[in-house]
């Protein structure tokens, strides 16, 4: 993950896509704009899943495949597109982390350890 963070620092600088750090007003506007762009990318993942479900139903009806067979085929068809949308989301999340000087890898493993050791309220 550190390699991705370093790559994106340089890439975003090169593309002039960095979050503004000039003053509060510009930073706030830039952060909110990037957050809006992130939510758009998350919505695009949802659209891909919706397409997968619709295409699965269509194959079940038209090709007389079982749901499981159709779903397996369709997941493979949409895999590349969803991968691209996930990459877009990661890029925006890492942009926020880089802006705040957060080491994503450390934060990730710290959070997983916290989850592992806390009492899960969903399990009784």
Image (cartoon, rainbow, N blue to C red):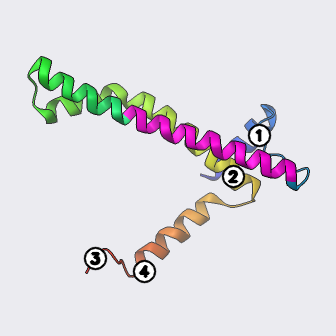
Q: Secondary structure under badge 4?
A: loop
Q: Earlier in the sequence, mark 4 or mark 1?
A: 1
Mark 1 against mark 3, which lies toward the viewer? 3
Which quadrant would residue 122 be assigned to in this image?
bottom left
Q: Are marks 2 and 1 in contact (CB under 8 Å)?
A: no
Residue 110 placement, left or right of 51: right
**Labels 1 and 3: the sequence-earlier one:** 1
Verify whether residue 2 appears in magenta.
no
Dot 2 falls on a residue whose secondary structure is helix
Q: Is residue 100 left or right of residue 35?
A: right
Residue 23 lies, in percent from the top left, at 90, 53
| Disc on the earlier residue, 4 or 3 | 4
The circle on residue 96 is 2
Q: Nearer the viewer, mark 4 or mark 3?
A: 3
Real-space CA distance between mark 4 and mark 3, rounded to the nearest whole angstrom: 11 Å
Q: CA distance from mark 1 to mark 3?
A: 44 Å
Q: Earlier in the sequence, mark 2 or mark 1?
A: 1
Crowd class of label 4 (few under 14; some 14 to 19; many from 20; radius 10 Å): few
Please tell me the numbered disc located at residue 118.
4
Tell me the crowding category of disc 2: few under 14, some 14 to 19, or many 20 or more residues within 10 angstroms, Cα based: some
Q: Is residue 79 visible?
A: yes
Tell me if label 3 and label 2 are in contact, CB under 8 Å.
Answer: no
* Residue underneath mark 3: 123
Mark 3 surroundings: few (<14), some (14-19) or many (≥20) residues within 10 A: few
Residue at the right extreme of this rendering: 22
Which residues fall within the magenta stretch? 25-48
Q: Residue at x 43, y 34 (%)?
A: 82
User: How much space separates mark 2 and mark 1, taking CA atoms?
Assistant: 14 Å
Q: Residue at x 40, y 32 (%)?
A: 48
SS at badge 3: loop
- Residue 28 lies in the magenta stretch: yes
């Amino acid at each position: 993950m550190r390699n991705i963070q370093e790559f994106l620092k340089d890439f975003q600088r090169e593309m002039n896509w960095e979050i503004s750090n000039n003053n509060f007003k510009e930073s706030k506007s830039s952060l909110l704009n990037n957050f809006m762009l992130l939510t758009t990318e998350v919505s695009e993942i949802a659209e891909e899943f919706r397409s997968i479900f619709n295409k699965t139903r269509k194959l079940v009806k038209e090709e007389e495949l079982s749901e499981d067979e159709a779903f397996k085929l369709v997941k493979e068809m949409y895999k590349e597109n969803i991968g691209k949308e996930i990459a877009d989301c990661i890029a925006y999340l890492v942009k926020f982390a880089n802006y705040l000087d957060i080491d994503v890898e450390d934060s990730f493993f710290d959070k997983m350890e916290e989850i592992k050791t806390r009492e899960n309220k969903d399990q009784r």
